[in-house]
Image: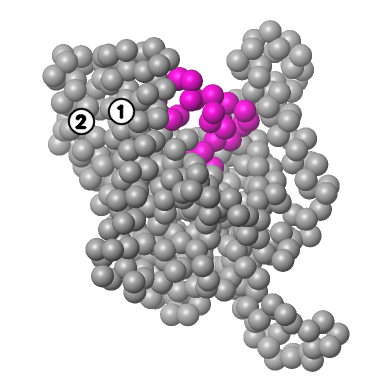
Amino acid sequence: MTIADQVTGSTIAGTAGAKPAEARPVDTKARVAAPAITLPVIGERELRLDLFRGLALWLIFIDHLPPNLLTWFTIRNYGFSDATEIFIFISGYTAAFVYGRAMLESGVVIATARILRRVWQIYVAHVFLFTIFLAEISYVATSFENPLYTEEMGIMDFLKQPDVTIVQALLLRFRPVNMDVLPLYIVLMLALPLILWSMKWKPDVTLGFSVLLYAVTWQYDLYFSAYPNGFWAFNPLAWQLLFVFGAWCALGGARRMSRILASPVTMWISIAYLVAAFCVTLTWYVPQLSHFMPKRLEQWMYPIDKTDLDVLRFTHFLALAALTVRFLPREWPGLRSPWLRPLILCGQHSLEIFCLGVFLAFAGHFILAEVSAGPGMHALISLSGILIMWGVAWVISWYKRVADKSGAKTKIAVGNADMAGGG
């Protein structure tokens, strides 16, 4: 199995135990009729996707809390990228895996209908989360007579003009703090039918157009406007690159990069870049080290923009992904370890756990502000939130396994992509 096979989850159908190339007859017709994209064979669940999706959910929750001891365990303190890149890449990968197969087997119309159905489900979840989040913040601000909560969480405009603000929220233009990921994902999923249709014929050209859109966005400062002013915290016109790249990898791109991924040169370049990024981030926390940074390098590098997915962030994620694929094979026994089971369970139910994490982050913020902000309370809030997320994920998994009779009829491919296709 090559490193690219480790990325896609299995070898190409029919290659296992095949004869050497020189012993196999060449089928010219089959070669001509081969699709531009390839999909891994349906098999057991890809636990690595669940593992890192669950890890991203935990890291996002911790990052949404005020800075505390556990914050130093999140990757944003040791490089340019953070959990958001992991989440969006895996979302693109799993969405393409599920709906790419549907498009090849059932056609564009059926696949598009399924995608739009999933978009509607995520949109309803976003509206539901928005409503609960507003109620939570408003209740706390009123009960404790502290209007700073409404200002800090970005809902002051809602209290001033609730009628206008609700309409803007339904249009995804108004979002309180920490509610930016789902609108981004909704927009990316809306573009998925076009992405998959294009990749069905020319996957590399599709990725090229994605890179071009990314470059044009930076060159001409394109963005989505937000209400009451400003722009989206995550610009879909830029973040689509990571989503499309994930889809491209799922549909055979990773397999075509097998030699690059297996090369020692790629490994050492990735390590060198990660070390350099770590040294740069050290200067953010130890100002005395900033004197060692060349001024020209600082002028070129800063600001490292998260809104438009700075190329340094994207490259940092690529370096992490290259090393992860190299050193974490699909058959790694640790994926079956009970110690990693909580992460995997959360990753398998990412939509529900993400919404819960946003709710818990504000609850933790409130407790730290009203009760105590000491390091002990910080650690207790963070660990309690993670345990609650794990517990809810376990209950959902138990329900789908035992109580939901239709769960047995769900295809494994769908189950591999919670944010993408349910399950």
Q: Residue 138 at what x, y percent from top left?
A: 18, 26
Q: Which residues are magenta?
A: 62-85
Residue nearest the observer in this picture, 84 or 154? 84
Direction top: furthest residue: 288
Residue nearest the observer in this picture, 288 or 375? 375
Q: Amino acid at mark 2?
A: Glu
Residue 41 visible in this rendered orientation of the protein: yes
Residue at the disc numbered 1: 362
Q: Residue at x 74, y 35 (%)?
A: 273
Residue nearest the observer in this picture, 109 or 21? 21
Q: Quick one: label 1 or label 2, which is nearer the N terminus?
A: 2
Q: Amino acid at mark 1?
A: Phe
Residue 304 is a magenta residue: no
Q: Are marks 1 and 2 in contact (CB under 8 Å)?
A: yes
Q: In this image, 109 relative to 298: left or right?
A: left
In terms of secondary structure, where does tag 1 sit?
helix
Q: Residue 106 at what x, y percent from top left?
A: 43, 80
Q: Residue at x 47, y 80 (%)?
A: 105
Q: Residue 405 at what x, y percent from top left?
A: 26, 70
Residue nearest the observer in this picture, 275 or 107? 275
